[in-house]
Amino acid sequence: TLTVWQSEGDSLKNIGAWPADIGRRSGDKIAEGDHKTPEGIYFFETMMDGKAINFEEYGVRIFTMDYPNYFDKLDKKTGSGIWLHAIPDTKSLLRGSRGCVVVRNHVIEELGKYIELRRTPIVVVDQVDYM
C-alpha cells in the first residue's frame, strides 16, 4: 500500500492510500538484478512521460528515485533505475516489478500533485507500525 502524508504544523495528515506493487522478491535490495525493492528514504529526482518510453511497462508517468543514495553506497548496494511508475489497467498490479514501486495510471496522476522533485521523500519499508 502506498500512503501519502502531509505535514500540518506538528502533526501529519493522511491524504490517502492506494494499492501498490513492489519487487518480485521480498527483502531489501542488495544487488543489481535481484528484483527487490530498496528499503530506505529516497527523493524523487525527475519526472518522465511513460508513454514516450514504454506505456505498457511504465504507464503514463515515471518519477525516478535517488537509489542508490549515500547510505546505500556505504552499504555497497548496487543497482539503478528504481522508480515510482504506473502501469495500464490491462496489466496485473500484482505481477511483481524489477524493484520499482508501481501503481495504476489514475493513482500516479493523483500522486503527482504531492510530489515536488528533489524535495518530496518516499519512505520504502516492509512494515509500518502506526502509533
Image (spheres, rainbow, N blue to C red):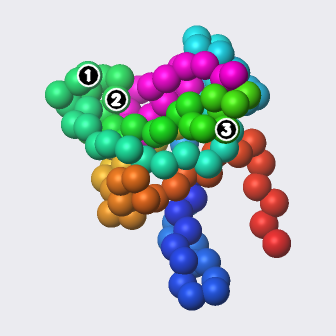
Q: Which residue occupies the extreme bottom position in the image?
A: 9
- What mark, if any, has residue 58 been given in the picture? 2
Residue type at mark 3: give it: Phe
x 37%, y 33%: residue: 87
Say if residue 85 shows up in the picture.
yes
The reply to whether discs 3 and 2 touch (Cβ–Cβ < 8 Å) is no
> Residue at label 3?
71
Residue type at mark 1: give it: Asn
Q: Quadrant of residue 7?
A: bottom right
Q: What is the magenta range?
A: 76-100
Q: Is residue 79 magenta?
A: yes
The reply to whether discs 2 and 1 touch (Cβ–Cβ < 8 Å) is yes
Residue type at mark 2: give it: Tyr
Q: Which residue occupies the extreme left position in the image?
A: 52
Which secondary structure, mark 3? Answer: helix
In the displayed structure image, the side of residue 25 where residue 50 appears, left or right: left
In front: mark 1 or mark 3? Answer: 3
Which secondary structure, mark 1? Answer: helix
Sequence-earlier tag: 1 or 3: 1
**How far apart are labels 3 and 2 at the CA level?**
27 Å
Sequence-earlier tag: 3 or 2: 2
**Residue 30, how many percent across, how many down?**
70, 21
Looking at the rendered image, the quarter that the C terminus falls into is bottom right
**Residue 45, how many percent across, how many down?**
38, 44
Compared to residue 119, the image places residue 55 above or below, namely above
In front: mark 3 or mark 2? Answer: 3
Which secondary structure, mark 2? Answer: helix
Label 1 environment density (alpha carbons within 10 Å; few <14, some 14–19, many ≥20): few
> Residue at label 1?
54
